[in-house]
Image (tube, coloured by chain):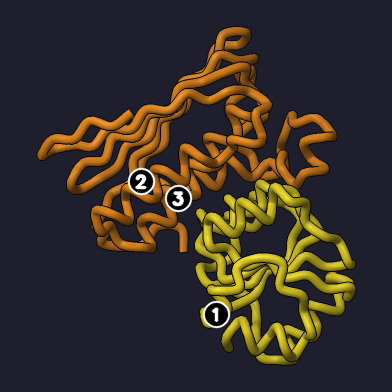
Chain colours: A yellow, B orange
Amino acid sequence: MKISEVVSRLQLGVAAGNEQLGRDIDSGYVSDLLSNVMGHAGAGAVWVTMQAHQNIVAVASLTDLAAIIIADGIMPDPHTLAKAESEGIVILTTPLSGYEVVGRLYGLGITGP
Amino acid sequence: MESLNTQVIVLNFELKGSDFEAAGEASSKIKLVLQQIGIRSDVIRRIAISAYEAEMNVIIHAYRGKMKAEIFSDHTKITLKDEGPGISDIKLAMQEGYSTAPDYIREMGFGAGMGLPNMVRCTDKFDIESSVGIGTTISMTVCHNPLTIVGQ
């Protein structure tokens, strides 16, 4: 499923990476521990987290993730967004809780790695 | 920064402890060069993950460090040498979940005790040496054409 379709089905905000929304999401992963994400999320995964600092961009980029969804209405700071734009990383936002986001992603057929 | 000949590309980086703003830049540069020379994407991912984990360890724990990537035609070797507190019990540090990172680092999602295990998992050869009060040296090698995919 394409990132753009998930954006519209879950009514997510697009905070960064508008040009990359045509990429496919292959799987999903949820964690606030960066090393867990690097160790277990697959390439092309959508990552659900409450971390919003700029280091999430490097994690997503180096692990080749499709997109980051920041849950619970948390907004990334301008540094994070600038870094995401320069590295072509998609950052999505939502007022939904992490639990709710993961449930809805699973309902769309996006499973774990 | 870069020297290029037919056999090896060498990239050198200076890392500064607690510089979370620049954290990951060295690993990103290494990844970019590997992409430019056409290394397999699953192999690049393993090099990028192990490089980032090692780079972050210097940022989190050390005062400063040097990171060197040597990209050969059939393998990449990454070496990090830091000046820092060192590791008194390497065996314990290698255990998943063990971490000495302070609380403010953990709140950022670092310090899960997964860094060293991730490095071992992603590399074909991993060596660590440490002296308490002096620093730690890590050396990692990843083959570019593995017969079997390690860690997946």
Image coords of residue B152 (percent x, y): 46, 64
Type of amino acid at the residue the image marks with label 3: Cys
Image coords of residue B47 (percent x, y): 41, 48
Q: Which residue is mark 2?
A: B124
Type of amino acid at the residue the image marks with label 1: Asp
Q: What residue is at 62 percent from the left and 29 percent from the top?
A: B59
Q: Nearer the viewer, mark 3 or mark 1?
A: 1
Q: Nearer the viewer, residue B145 or B9?
A: B9
Name the chain under label 3: B
Instruction: Quarter of the image for the N terminus of chain B: give it.
Output: top left
Q: Residue furthest left?
A: B6
Name the chain under label 1: A
Q: What residue is at 53 percent from the left and 82 percent from the top?
A: A22
Instruction: Decide if residue A34 is on the left or right side of residue A38.
Output: right
Q: What residue is at 39 percent from the left and 36 percent from the top?
A: B140
Q: Which residue is mark 3?
A: B122
Measure the alpha-carbon separation of dots 2 and 3.
Answer: 7 Å
Q: Nearer the viewer, residue A44 or B141?
A: A44
Type of amino acid at the residue the image marks with label 2: Asp
Q: Nearer the viewer, mark 1 or mark 2?
A: 1
Image coords of residue B91 (percent x, y): 59, 30
* Proximity of marks 3 and 1: CB atoms separated by less than 8 Å: no
Mark number, residue A26? 1
Q: Label 1's element? A: loop
Q: In which quarter of the view is residue B57 placed?
A: top right
Measure the alpha-carbon separation of dots 1 and 2.
Answer: 26 Å
